Image: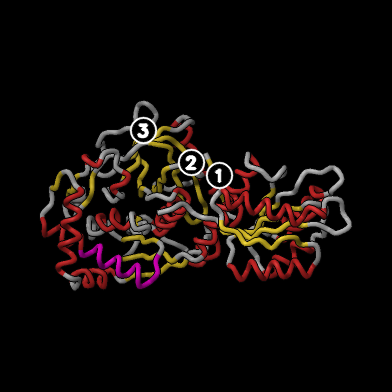
Amino acid sequence: MNKITPYAGVAALASPLEVGADRAERTALELGRLLESAGCRIVNAGAIKNAGQAGNAGLLFSEKRVSSIVLTPTSWFEDYLVLDLLEECDAPVALWPLPGMETGALCGTQQLGCYLKQLGKSWSAVFGEIKAGEQFDRCMRFLRASALHYILRRARIGIAGQRVRGMTYVAPNEISLKKTFGCRVVPLDLLGLLKAGRDSDATLKKQVWENVKKAAARIDVSDAAGLDAAEMYLAIKKAVDAEGLSALAFGCYPDFMGHACLSASLLADEGIPIACEGDVHGAIGMLLLQSLTGAPTHNTDWLDPLPDGSVVFTHCGSSSYSLAADIKDIKLAKVRLACQGVCSLFPAKTGPVTLASILPKGDDYQLAVIEGEAVPTEMVFPGNPLRVKFKAPVREIMDWIFNEGIGHHWMAGYGHVAGEIRDLAGIIGLKLCVM
């Protein structure tokens, strides 16, 4: 599983009579090489100095299906150059004007920014020489957010069964969801999944279960329960492939608790996050964090703060084994409360984390994000406890959650990516709550 890879269209902007126009072609090449050095894929259109070149560049970028466009003004330029380009390829735009007192590159960028802002286009700007450093880091953050936007607009999120009765806010508004994040919801028949599991190849089921047992240090469930969990994994995997799903929400509580927990642990390593309790928003949050961090994520609830101000986040035991603090701690057990199925229990590993919460707000959506540091923890809850310390006092954070009306489900990914999420919110026009 790899981190998201931006795919950018690159060009330089200039007006032929202006000082600095003569370095447009060279600068486009320099910018392209710098982006490629950071792992970007690029399509370079060279210099854009007239409407014809602008339209051709837009057609090229559209044909190549870029996720973003990076334009470097080397002189003052006519704003319609970018407008004509965007008519052919309406992707988020990063502007990087070069310094130069006589060039007017910064002036051109400011005049264009005024226009783009009023048109409601997604854009960002930095200023300085084309080189590695703070401005380049800001540009790359925007490009990663744009690449994430591209992925989300094409994502299909499955929901098997129904959301939890009495947990209203996890119900998706499918039209608003498509309008904002761009994801499409795909309903799956839960009874059909169960039948597909029962009908799956017996040898394959046994092989899956035997491999799982080898990865666990302790097994407190029967082989019969393990084979049932393996068949659910095979059924979900088949549905994921058939429907082209990017993520899945499973309606587990209360009747099907423990049925898909092992599936979630296994499929996380295959790049398919599974959220609990039929929470489509949780599945999107996991996909979002997975794309930015390049690693599996945790599906969690916010539990009680500890005396030192840290907070334990966890669910019943459905995280990837790669997120265990110590593989020797992995125990296969029945799900809590229902005492059925197969869960994988272990304390979570340490490191920087970003937690995200997505929920509907009337006809729109809200995204909340907070960064912290995962620290060592004991098995204080039968699941995959993740203990996080924050910079702000925990009471202050809890007041923020109450005041903003943020729910209890938090998806957690390793690494600090709040900056990219902030840029994503700007691109899609989403209300962002940051602590």
Q: Which residue is mark 2?
A: 416
| Amino acid type at mark 3 | Val
**Quadrant of the image for the N terminus?**
bottom left
Quick one: 169 or 59, which is closer to the camera? 59
| Amino acid type at mark 2 | His
State the mark number for residue 151.
Answer: none
Are there few (<14), some (14-19), or many (20+) residues within 10 Å of tag 1?
some
- Residue 253 percent location from the top left of the image: 27, 56
Q: Main secondary structure of the magenta part?
A: helix
- Residue 226 percent location from the top left of the image: 16, 57
Name which residue lies at 38% across and 31% down: 310
Determine whether, in the image, residue 205 is placed left or right of residue 81. left
- Residue 79 percent location from the top left of the image: 80, 60
Asked if 295 appears above or below 42 in the picture, the reply is: above
Name which residue lies at 29% across and 65% down: 236
Q: Which residue is mark 1?
A: 419
Number of residue marks? 3
Cβ–Cβ below 8 Å for labels 1 and 2?
yes
Asked if 285 appears above or below 85 in the picture, the reply is: above
What colouring method underlies this structural image? secondary structure
Residue furthest toward the right? 17
Determine whether, in the image, residue 158 is placed left or right of residue 8. left
State the mark number for residue 375.
Answer: 3
Are there few (<14), some (14-19), or many (20+) residues within 10 Å of tag 2?
many
**Distance Cα–Cα, label 1 vs label 2:** 8 Å
Secondary structure under the numbered disc 1 in the rendered image: helix
